[in-house]
Amino acid sequence: MFHPTQRTWALAASWTSCAEFQTEPCKIYKEIFVTKNLGEEWNYMTNYVYDFEWGQSIHAKEHGVKIPDERVFVTRDDNAKGHQSDSKRKTWSTQIDLFVSDDFFGTSTKILE
Amino acid sequence: MKTPQYMFVAVAHTDEKRIQIFSSNFQSGFMTLKKVRLPKDAQLSNTFTLLDTSESQVFMFIENHGTTSPFGNLYISDEKGRSFTLSMSNVIKGVAVDFERVNSLDGTFIVNRYNKLVPGQRSKPDLSITEFDEADMISEEAKKSRMQRPGMENTSRKQQSTVKEAMRIPDSIPQQEVFDNVRTYITHNKGAKWELIRAPTQTSKGSPIDCHVEDECSLHLEIYSQGPTLAPVYSTETSVGIVLGTGNLGKRLSNVNEPKNMYISRDGGLNWKSTKAGAHIYELGDHGSIIVAAKHD
């Protein structure tokens, strides 16, 4: 998902694969990554992700509302262990919370449970 | 769900079936998420559909009769996207919600609505549904705080019945009967007032048409609910005022297999002309000076 105003920035999510787990039992879950140079380098942000969105908005920019370009909203299961539950996608789950981060999940805040 | 102006979040109710809807807007950098204010019968739904967020207002569709019912209510918000009121009840949802923004004129929208005609009774858009006042809000809040107290969950019988009422599925209305009683309505003021569409006065061949709104006869247009068989209402931002549609004249939108004609409006959906007999697919070019139509068999 490309950034609304930064042309070279994008978010992408991918599922883990068993090949990544050598010393521990393999766990399949969705991770989210960010690139700032059109995909040459990707940096890991967080895990057990469901949906994600950039916080920036062209409309806000046009109206002089300052939103950090780095802002990302993510829904994720903070307490999950093991495989990511697929059934939570099919129904509404109380275990998935909305997080926001302005530094690509160096720090993040839960804003809605 | 995020648009350039608004962010909407569904928060799962403890039963993991129903949701509460929260919204925020760009003014706060989308950070101040608050519960949206909805009329009582729409407060606990299991899904919601954002239909339009243009012109600083949100049109939201809620299946307040449950997801198995082929219709639901259309609500419109304030500028903040926080307080919603009923704009139109019983809007049809088939493959998609039968709601279309007329891109060629601000404030204009077309919907298809389940509206059964009772013989001898003049039908009006039924907008007198559940007034929602501050007292209701307070009692609702009180109920919720009661609910959150441990050991007190679901003790209020009244509340249980309210929930049941809200989730009631009208089994009494078979799907076929709903789709047999669909009428098309248009608004020219963003959902404040909805009207039936006045029929053209002449056929495409020039013979007079005797079809008046006063006699329950109007123009009905196809949107999405019948699937991709017929072209939906169509307009583009660059062809100001022009709207194209496929439909029929009469008391209701006829079955998808019955004869349909192509209609055009040049004044944002107020007056319509019968252009071509038969269903067509169409496209607009060069600010509306070129209109291409191809017969749809």
Image (tube, coloured by chain):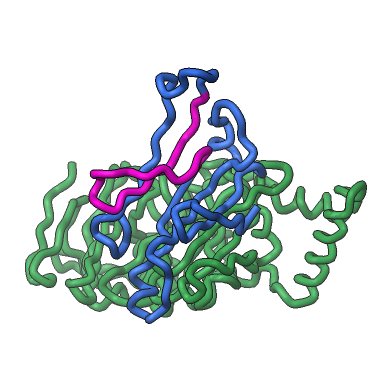
Which chain appears blue? A
Q: Is residue B81 left or right of residue B46?
A: left
Corner quadrant of residue B118: bottom right
Number of on-image labels: 0
Is B83 placed above or below A24 here? below
Q: Is residue A31 left or right of residue B147?
A: left
Q: In this view, does B68 lie to the left or right of B221?
A: right
B207 and B44: which one is in front? Answer: B44
Q: Position of residue A27 (x, y in %)?
A: 52, 24
Q: Does the magenta stretch include residue A112?
A: no
Q: Where is residue B51 in the image (x, y as percent from the top left)?
A: 43, 60
Q: Residue at x 17, y 63 (%)?
A: B275
Return the residue found at the far front: A23
A48 and A19: which one is in front? Answer: A19
Is A16 placed above or below B187 here? above
Corner quadrant of residue B229: top left
Q: Which residue is drawn at 53% across and 55% down?
A: A107
The quadrant of the image that shows the C terminus of chain B is top left
Q: Which region is colored magenta?
A: A27-50
Q: Position of residue B58 (x, y in %)?
A: 48, 69
Q: Which residue is drawn at 45% across and 58% down?
A: A103
What's the colour of chain B in the image?
A: green
Can the viewer see residue B124 in this picture? no
Q: Does the magenta stretch include residue A36?
A: yes
Q: Where is residue B133 in the image (x, y as percent from the top left)?
A: 73, 76
Can the viewer see residue A18 in this picture? yes
Q: Which residue is drawn at 57% across and 44% down?
A: B67
Is B190 placed above or below A71 here? below
